Image: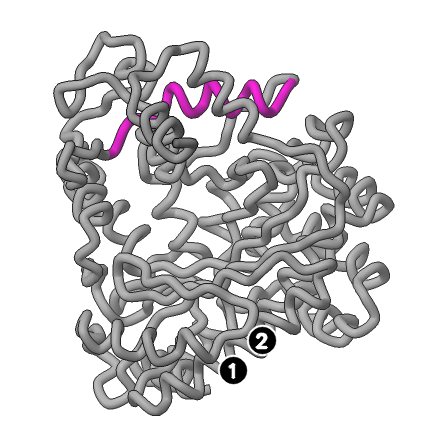
Amino acid sequence: MTLFIRATAEAAPLTLEAACSEIYDAALVESVVGTVGLEVETHLVDLAAPADRVPWAGICGAVDAATPQLRRSAITIEPGGQVELSGAPAPGISDAIAAMRRDEQRLRLVLAEHDLGLAHLGADPVRAPRRVNPRPRYRAMERHFIATGRAEAGATMMCATAALQVNLQAGPRSSWAARVSLAHQLGPTLVAIAACSRWLGGKDSGWASTRQRAWSRLDPRTGGPVALAHDPADDWVRHALAAPVLFARTEGGDAVSIARSVPFGAWLSGRVRLADRRPTVEDLHTHLSTLFPPVRMRGYLELRYLDISAPRWWPAVAAVTTTLMDDAGAADAAAAATDGTAGMWEAAARCGLGDPALAASARRCMAIAVDRVPPELGTAVADLAELVESGRSPGDVVVDRIREVGAQAVLEEVARA
């Protein structure tokens, strides 16, 4: 009976008051800072034919074989055939990284039996963006982006990019405003430090983070940062209601693309009818899953703005990000170090550490983190700090290698590493 009541409630038309309450309550959950979750997204590469996308059947077979071998991570397949490992929450960044690295290695070993490899790069340097995952959700999103004039950015974002996501606790309610603000303020500097996606589809884009560029070229209500005022949960409510609906579910469960820009609030108020009905709680949850700001609130904080990079670098990027957010002394120092670079999202994506202000804030943040990361991560972070001190990011190392041997050779090298 309880399940029937819940299903009925989720299928009932939603009121504005109920929607606002649902979004607000789910935005941030009072918690103790310390637990960390990591999500690592990578490109799947056919080692026998690196320039070709892996067929859907081949992806599914390999992932099905790998899933039972993973201990702490769930695995999903992204629209372009990228694979994502989502680690279970861990008591600290060291444990989170160690668990993720073990599952990464297990995944690599299984994939190797299928002659497949993983390329830790923020953007696919060789293959043009193309959707291979037939899931109705992704098909509908693709059609929405085409219909609303954002086909290129949408295809790149969905099918040709890969990220490192750091998930952190919201913390005590009294610190929410400062904590969410800091997550945004650190963003441009961390984008510049982590940048590893200059090459895309066989071409040098000229941007340090082509992945971040793709997100920024979506509708800003879909991919742009949340406008912060006083209460971040309230800000998230306003952001969600203003964001366009990408698709709606039919009674049969299919995903129907919305071929124009319709804010969820317009559907909710009845000004616009989509799928010939009013939205339900289930529709709201689906809508929230299609919002991709650099910092997303899901009870905890998703920091979504980091390019994935080689196993030599990404653990250090994750450690620095977590330390600057979760260590109180480091957070205060990082806030001061990035005061002049807050909001420089475009400069960070375009120029990375080539921007003097971002290079300075990056060096200061790395110096703060080096002294405060867990000892077992000290060597990796010091290695990254040395790279940043030289004015280079992990992506610059990749670009140097591409200039030596070519993009396809690098894709294969990285996938075999």
Q: Position of residue 242 (x, y in %)?
A: 37, 20
**Can the viewer see residue 220?**
no
The segment highlighted magenta reads 231-246
Q: Which residue is mark 1?
A: 105
* Residue at image location 24% in from the left, 51% down from the top: 155
Q: Position of residue 173 (x, y in %)?
A: 73, 27
Crowd rating for badge 2 (residues with CA inside 10 Å; few <14, some 14–19, many 20+)? some
Q: Is residue 300 found left or right of 78 in the rendered image? A: right
**Can the viewer see residue 176?**
yes
At label 1, the amino acid type is Gln
Magenta-drawn stretch, dominant element (helix, strand or loop): helix
Q: Is residue 139 above or below residue 196?
A: above
Q: Nearer the viewer, residue 58 or 397?
A: 58
Q: Is residue 141 found left or right of 208 in the rendered image? A: left
* Residue at image location 21% in from the left, 60% down from the top: 133
Q: Which residue is mark 2?
A: 101
Helix, strand, or loop for circle 2?
helix
Residue placed farthest to the front in the image?
1
Q: Position of residue 202 (x, y in %)?
A: 26, 69
Q: Is residue 143 above or below residue 261?
A: below
